[in-house]
Structure formats: structure tokens, C-alpha cells
Image: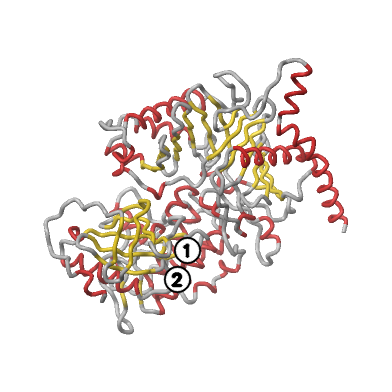
Amino acid sequence: MARESIFDFCVPMEKAKPKEVPSVVVDAKGKKTFIKGRFLGKGGFARCWELCDKDTGVKYAGKVVAKSDLVKSSQRQKMQQEIIIHASLRHENVVGFHRSFEDETNIYILLELCTRRTLMELHKRRLQVTEPESRYFIRQIVNGCQYLHLNNIIHRDLKLANLFLNDDMIIKIGDFGLASKITKDGEKKRTLCGTPNYIAPEILNKHGHSFEVDSWSVGCILYTLLVGRPPFETSNLKDTYERIKKNEYVIPSHVSVAASTLIRALLDADPKKRPSMFSVLDHEFFKGFTPACLPVSALTTCPRFDNLCRTMADRRPLSVIDANLNDMSTVNVEGNRDFFSDDCWLGILRDKLGDLLTSPILKTNHINAMEDSEDPACVPIYWISKWVDYSDKYGIGYHLCDSSNGVLFNDDTRLLSTANQLNLQYIEKNGKEYLYTKTEYPPSLSKKVTLLTCFASYMHENLLHAGENIVRRESDNMARLPFLRTWFRTRVAIVLHLSNGTLQLNFFDDHSKIILCPLMEAVTYIDPNRDFKTFRFNLLKTNGITEVLMSRLRYAHEMITCRLLRSTHRTRSTNTAGGSSRDSRGTAPTSAGAGDAHGAAQMRQNDPVSAAIATGRQAARTALAATEALKRK
């Protein structure tokens, strides 16, 4: 169908609550049927669902706009222009446009599904990123802008929330609602538009604007990624606009000279002096090390660049990872000390939960009663999907949702292996972190590596669902995982606190779970039926909470206040219900014998971890001998 006809049914009408999007969406003219999947989010007039092509199985992000919301002619024209512009674009760094169609109630726009959300969520979790990461992102943003500008399109709303990430952590520029096409050389646009923290001064001053406003926005994005906040941000809009007009901002001393000069160039008050998207990549800043890809773990944790950086010339050592060390390198986290919290945000989470506990209680306990508070963009990147408690002998083993594994040992050290099973991450009791590979690690870690392998094998064989699909990526070699910081068990739940601030409680009575993120200010609730929903604190505060979820939030608040914040180090778990080791099914993974010699022997015989240690020692010695031989060569 012609795109101009998409608004045939859009007549002014009284605004009403949008009707529910049907479970089966039909493009009658295109003869296509799509199955509605999970809710992805909402913003402005649009709501977004995952829509799956019934014939091919391909999944799209379905942007749905109710016709009843498009009351004004200007709103209809604006959306029509967005569709026309976006439909004309095809580039690896632009969100893919699949099709648009309508039914009697809604307009549907099917776009490329970007599973890793946006740079805004990454920014909220990370606060700051390293310069190699910023180069990786900015280079792709610039590539996308070059394509837009070659096609005479100004985006005019470049910001973190409009920079999407696909499953391979590739940047995709999206949301062309404010985009405009230049139709003749030297044309200046005069519409006042943009997002306050990223808007260029020539737009505010109404001097007319062109492609240079995108350069300004890229400068704001680079500053935000490196510093942790937008350059002109204040507590009120008027002051922000004044700072933009006066070009008042400060670059902190930790930002490199090259990055600082690029930011100043992009944020030049004179549009003519700003580097264009075609010249900016020649800047000195882009001569530094840029990773070819990034791991998914970069959404929440600084990556490991140790091996990659050592091979790059003409660069200075990174502030986050000491590149002068060998493959068994030490991670230096001093670079993010301004944002590091000694209690891993527990104090902040306690206060936010305390405020949330005053929310109104809903009359029903059905999870869908809180749908107005749902925000899938806040879904946690990592949570513990399986665990096994061997704290009577070794520690607690756990399996993260990305198929990586870890052990928190009884001596308060930690060892993790990435999903590709090739890389190791070892954290000493004092927090010092070492990065190794499965084939190269010090002999002193041999037993712990064997234990980690045994824990992982036990969880895989006894706890994981059959047919689990694990995608291996080259970027896994750069992954640095959040680790289990502390944990304990009560008669009610197991409480697990990760180093990225995530707090998880698994309740024993009905197997429900809550996952709390202080940085995203959100709670994920997995009910007994395994329905998985994520809600923002501020929306729950306004819209209300079910009594079931509220009772769990109260318990979490109590555990933070009475247990977690009172501990200055990890508290050894005690099984208040009595018994021996447990796993995430609540069953004992070992068969504990009596207290005599025969019982001890029986325990060792039936203990898969102890047995595996004995059989694995020789393999470990062989691997170490081979490594030493390679070193001598």
C-alpha cells in the first residue's frame, strides 16, 4: 500500500484509552500475520510489542500507535514524515525498517528488534564507560550519521535513549520523529525541537540550524559516556538552556587530553567550527585503541581489554585495566572510584525501598494488575538462575542467566568462568581482581578451578533445563562478570547480592523471586507461574502494588536493614532449617553419612565435588605442565 494512505482512517476524535492490541495482528494488504509477543515498552503516543512473523518466525519490534491518539493534523503529519524518512533508510548503524500498515484501530510500524535496549540503560547501570568503549560507540554513531547526512537527513534528536543496541552490541540509530530532510543547499531549519540536555544553541537562539546540530549532540553523548552526566545538565530547564547558550560546562581531569579536545570541538558554540561527521574520525581521539566488539557484560561491568590492548601501538595504558601486565593481568578499578559504593548501593536501595513501602495496595494479587508500572527496559542483565550450597565444605556455586558460572568460596575469594568456558575471573578477599584463561592460571588456583568445574557440571547435569541454547561469541573473551558479593539463607528465602548492586531473593514457599536494581530503580518479579515482569519504583509508587509483591519488598527491606548493611564482610550462610548442603531445588546434592569414619568415607564417596577433585588433579597437573612447556618455548 502507498505510505501516504496509512492515515486514511486517522480522523480527529475524542481521545480515549487505547484498545488492547490483538494477540494476532494482520497486515491485510500485505497478506502477513504477526503473533503478539512480550511487551517492550512505551513512550509518547507509541506502545511497543514483540511481533513475530507467523510464516518465517522472524521477530520484530512492533511500534503501535492508536489512531485515537492522533487528534491533531500536525501529529498525523509528523508521524507520516517519520515513516517516510525511516522507510527510506538502510544502514548497519540505523534501526532497520521492515514495514508499516494499519487496521481499524492502530497504525503498526515493524522495526528491527534491538534486544540490548539503548545506551541510556547502559549509562544508568555503568554511569561511566572507558575511553575504548566510548570510541567503539561514537565511531558507530558517526558512521550512522554520515549515512544520514549523505541522504540529506538531520536526525535532530540524537541522545542515549535513541541509540539502540542489538544482540551483538552494535549501535543502531532510531526514532526519526524529529528528523528532517534538507531539500536544497544551505537550507536552514527553524523548528524548535530536541531534548533539553542535547539541544544545540543555534536551535535555542532560533538562528536556523542544519547538520551541525547532530555534531553537537554527538559531543554531548561522548561527554555523558565518559563523565557520567550530560555537560549542561542542571536541576531545572531554564538554567540548562542558559548554560547551553553561554557554553558553560566543565570537563573533569580524569578525561584524557584527546577526548577533551574532541568534546570542545564538537561543543563549539559556532556551528561552522564544529567538525562534520565526515571529518571527525580524523581526530586524535580515534587513534587510540578501539575494540572490534564488546561483550554483553559491558552493559553492566567494565570489559577486560588486557589481551587486546597489549597488541595495539601508539596508545597510553588504560585507566581501568593495566595493559602492561601479562595475560594474568590485574584489574585496577580506581578509575571508577567516584562512582563506587562501599556497600554496593545497599544504602540507596534501602532508602528507595523504604519510600516504596508507602505505596497504595491493589485489591488484586494478579501480576497483570501492575501492567501500567511495567518497564521492560529495566530488565536485569544478570541474575542467578541456579545455585548449589556446599558451604559446609567449599562455598556456594551459582549459574548466571548468561550461562556463566561462579563460586563464592568459604575463604571469601571468588572464581568465575565466562559463558564460553575459556576465561576465568578471580577475586581475592581484599577485592583485587585477576583475569586468567582456562589454560593459564597459577598452580595455587588449581583446586579452586577444579571445584568451579565440578560445581558447573553438577548444576548443568542436575539443575539446568534440557535443550538450553547457549550462544558463544568472540566478545566473550572480553567479558567481566558481576560476582556474588554476599549471601545468606533464612527460613523464608535465600538472599543473593551481586557486585553490580543487584539484590535477589528466592522465596522457598512458592518459588517466587524478586530481583532489585538500585541503579535502574526497578524490581523484577517472577511469580510462581514463572511470569517475568519488571516494574519501575516510581510507577509502582503512583499506581500501586499487589499485597503479594509488597510483602516480598517488605522482607527485602528488612534483610537489607537488619542483615546486609550490618555486615562489613560476607557472612557465612547457616542453614536455619537444619540439614546439609542444598541446591536451588531445595534438595541435598550430597548424601551425608554419619559422624563416624564409615560415614565420612560414605560422604566422600557420594560427594560429586570431592570425587571430581581427586580425579581432576591429574588433569590439572597435565595442563599446567603443558603450559609451562609452552612458556619455555
Q: Nearer the viewer, residue 504 or 250?
A: 504
Q: Give the amino acid at mark 2.
A: Gly
Quarter of the view holding residue 541: top left
**Please, is residue 81 above or below residue 16 in the view?**
below
Image-based side of 385 in relation to 394, left or right? left
Quadrant in which the N terminus is drawn: bottom left
Q: Nearer the viewer, residue 266 or 577?
A: 577
Q: Residue furthest bottom?
A: 185
Residue 16 in view of the camera: yes
Q: How is the image coloured?
A: secondary structure
Do the residues under discs 2 and 1 have CB atoms within 8 angstroms? yes
Quadrant in which the C terminus is drawn: bottom right
User: Where does label 2 land, which residue?
Assistant: 144
Q: Position of residue 564 (x, y in %)?
A: 51, 27
The residue sitting at 25% across, 65% down in the picture is 102
Q: Residues within 10 Å of mark 2 (few under 14, many from 20)?
A: many
Q: Give the amino acid at mark 1.
A: Ile
Q: Residues within 10 Å of mark 1 (few under 14, many from 20)?
A: many
Q: Position of residue 573 (x, y in %)?
A: 59, 25
Quarter of the view holding residue 201: bottom left
Q: CA distance from mark 2 to mark 1?
A: 9 Å
Find residue 171 and name its label.
Answer: 1
Q: Nearer the viewer, residue 631 or 473?
A: 473
Which numbered disc, 2 or 1, marks the residue that appears first in the sequence?
Answer: 2
